[in-house]
Image (tube, grey):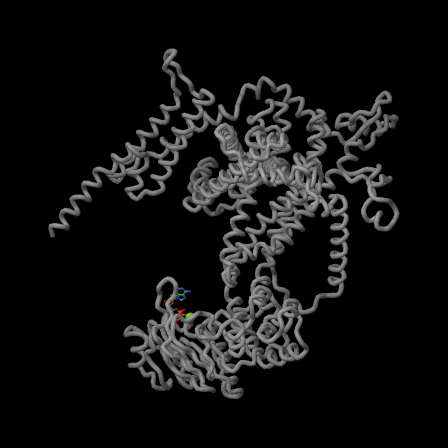
Amino acid sequence: MLKIENLCKTYPNGTQALNGVSFEVEEGEFLAVIGLSGSGKSTLLRCINRLIEPTSGNIIWNGDDITAATGKEIRNIRRQIGMIFQQFNLVKRSSVNINVLSGRLGYVSTLPSLFHIFSKEDHERVKKTLEMVGLADKIDVRADSLSGGQQQRVGIARALMQEPKMILADEPVASLDPVLAHSILKYLEKLNKEYGMTVICSLHFLDLVHRYATRAIALNEGLLVFEGMPQEIDDAMFKHIYGKEAERIEII
Amino acid sequence: MTTQHSKNDSNEFNQKIIPFLSIIIPGSSQFLFKKNWRGFTIFIFSIISGFLIHWGYDKFNIGKVSINADVSFSWLIFPFLFFYFWNILDAFLIQRDKKSPVLLAFFSIAIILYVIGWSVTGVKLDRLITRFDDAKSVMRKLVNPDFFSTEVDGKIEICSWGCLWDYTAAKFTGAQPPEVFLSTNVGQIFGQKGTVTASSWAVLLGKATKNERIPGFETGKIIETIAIGLLATIFSTILAVPVSFLAAHNIMKRIPGGSIVYYISRTILNIVRAIDTIVWGLIIIVWVGLGSFAGVIALTIHSIAALGKLFSEEIEHIDSGPVEAIEATGGNFYHIVRYAVIPQVIPSFLSYTLLRWDINMRSATVIGFVAGGGIGFFVLETIRMGGYQQYAAALWAIAVVIIVVDYISSKWRFNILKDQPKTAAEIPAWKKIRNVIYVIIGIIVFLYAWEIAKIDLTKLFDPGPTFGRLLKDFVSVDLTGKVIDNVVRELIITIMQAFLATTLGGVLAIPFSFLAAKNLTGKNKFSAWIFYIVRSTFNVLRSIEALLYVAIFVYWVGIGPFAGMLALSVTTFALLGKLFSEAIENIEPGSIEAVNATGANKLQAIVYSIVPQIVPPFLSYLIYQWDINIRMATIIGFAGGGGIGLMLSTFFGSLQYHKAGTVILAIVIVIAIMDFSSAKIREKFV
Ligand SMILES: Nc1ncnc2c1ncn2[C@@H]1O[C@H](COP(=O)(O)OP(=O)(O)OP(=O)(O)O)[C@@H](O)[C@H]1O
Ligand SMILES: [Mg+2]
């Protein structure tokens, strides 16, 4: 269980990105995080694995205080949390193989990994995960020769290499067209349903939230303005979250 | 209400008062009117020109006008006063939302700078004419290089074009002309049979004893030069990579205390870079002695700093996404560097290395002037003995090598930056074999270069006898009044050399650049010829360093800053000519068409459509060239071109290291200021 208590983040330039956010996530949930651009979604997700240092507040995960972890501890926590990014964040010039293998870095000893030396099991694991995301034949090509949807699947494969208990996905489909959006989210759904991984995913489109999430929270200017079932977000709630001018748009 | 009123009042009052401030401090009212650039420029130029007028009058009686025995002054105060009054007028006009024409101010300052520059660099235009016969004779020698020899009455003589022509003609008619053969000069440049010191490999294999002279192939000076440039590039790249990580802020802020390391490394890199390769050569020979090894070290040191800076900027500009991703997987600092940073920077590192190789090859041709290795040393010797035809042969050899290197380097850079992803999963077998062969060739070339550049790492730990003193004296630089006085004088001369050369070369380059632009000339057969001739002239002239040209101008106008300035003008002319013509080629073809469509003639088309498009790139290249020239001017004195370089080599030669330290310090400061201001100007205008 992930428990977030009174989380605040103020950037060095004075921007208050998170303003006392508290909520809980049960194991096995698919939690959607929604909110306007700039409302603090990315900041929240990055605080959870400490890519960003929170200014105050606590993040407790299965009894461990993530906010208090240091050095080696924090890296041990990170490797149990997979992360998927809007811009995929692959090393474009490296092969798919190396990109996926890099998901193992938290587990292996430093020196061999600096020479791209990994165990046989790790190589097997790459094959398995790439098969799972349907990219087994692309193992040796460079990441930048893949399409956007394929790159995001490599991103998922990299996260899976960590054998994560939880997945943070920061707008994983915002750079993809609607058809691909569904295919990517189906992978996340599969990980959530079949493997029981907790998924926390920020999303822009409400129908995607309705379709995939088991629960949702909404942020507005760093404040938690909604917490509940996706179905509860009706037009009134929508206007409350996104402001009066907002119009709902649907995608396929 | 009342407060509002009085505030407005005082504002109005201020507006009235402000222009008067320019009478006391030029530029200050422009500054207060929020025209910061204008104000600052006026202020700086009044200080600089005021100082220069006073200094020039004091030291060299520049512009001296005597009214009677007691009263005399410099007429340059007239343009200065003109500028001063212009500034006041400008202030009042700005208050009325108008501006006075900048061109007037520009001219008055230009007059002051040119008159002073003209005097201190000893420009004597008459010499260009009166000694034109000398120029002709040196030119004749330059176009008749010493490549072939023939025997005349038992004596060996140079056989240049005329002689070669007679020879071939005689051969055709079936006569028996005296034999023509490659001269010993060619042997010295490219290599010949002779006696050599036994190589360390031969010693290792037990075939010779150390330092034994054995018959063998004497390496040519140009080959030695290539080896110097190659090794320096390899060494500096290897060393610059770790250094660049220390000087990259996004990397260093990840480790405790890293920010301090970052600032220290950046500062050191900037200082080392400001000292020219040639000056490093002077320091290094005190350490390891004369020879190509010293040259390699000097080039390496300067390249580490230059590459280190470029590399670190490249690291700072990587996409931070992959860094974040690797961090999120639980990777540590080394993982981030290895998996997220290095793959991203490899292409640009390679491309910078190739660029540096080009630069190092050019430096390698002149490092011999001070360090005593490679073709530069050979050139120095031939000039000393008046062997201008041998010198000419060396210049042609250098031109060929540099043009080839330039071509290879830019072609490879182009391929690297295209950086196409390989979609084929398997590398074909023949490519694997080819790569292995490349590696083997690379290793052999490296070892061979190591041998001919006489790399001897033990020398590093056995510094020369005065090296300790040099280090000690460098720390306690001589800042006494007289030394400072002299250093300031030479610095002004040096800056003026760069200033005159940049403007002179630039102005000359403009008309020729139009001839070398493919979209203007090259339309029909005749103009295509013009295009090729002008372009190749640019390329040949550009391939030879200014330092190597000085000898020609020394012969023509005599030793001193004027000769140095002319040498700098030649390289300026060539490089700017090339860059300008490329800028012209890059203009939009549509705009010429549009002007042509209105029925305008060629000249009108140039004025209305081309000029507006090329002014910004021309200015930016001019500033770029100014940066280069100011550096070059600091070393032009090593070849007899006057300025601070001459002073520096004198101090080194007479072991006055504390004074040499003063000079180097002054150079570093001047270069830093110039770099800073040209970066600012570029930001503002280009
Ligand atoms: N490194 C930073 N430094 C300063 N301010 C930042 C930084 N990163 C984000 N912010 C600010 O913090 C606020 C929240 O940003 P965040 O990226 O978390 O929003 P978001 O909800 O993810 O938006 P989007 O949908 O556009 O991705 C914004 O106002 C943003 O400008
Ligand atoms: Mg975001």
Residue B379 showing in the rendered view: yes
Q: Quadrant of the C terminus of chain B?
A: top left
Q: Quadrant of residue B144?
A: top right
Residue visible at 62% across and 30% down in the picture? B654
Which residue is at the far top? B69
Q: Where does residue B85 sit, x and y in percent of width and height?
A: 30, 29
Ligand 1 image-quadrant field: bottom left
Q: Position of residue A85 (x, y in %)?
A: 49, 72
Say above or below: A69 vs B550. below
In this view, the residue in front, A209 or B300, is B300
Left or right: where A175 falls relative to B196: left
Q: Position of residue A142 (x, y in %)?
A: 61, 67
- For this rendering, which residue is in front, B300 or A141? B300
> Viewed as shown, does residue B193 lie left or right of B322?
right
Q: Residue furthest left?
A: B2
Does residue B525 appear in the picture of this structure? no
Residue B553 falls left or right of residue B437 = left
The tally of labels here is 0
Tell me where residue A92 sits by quadrant.
bottom right
Above/below status of B627 relative to B343: above
Residue B564 x %, y % = 57, 29
Seen at 62% across and 23% down, the residue is B556
The residue at 79%/35% (across/down) is B187
Residue B379 in the image: above or below residue B686: above
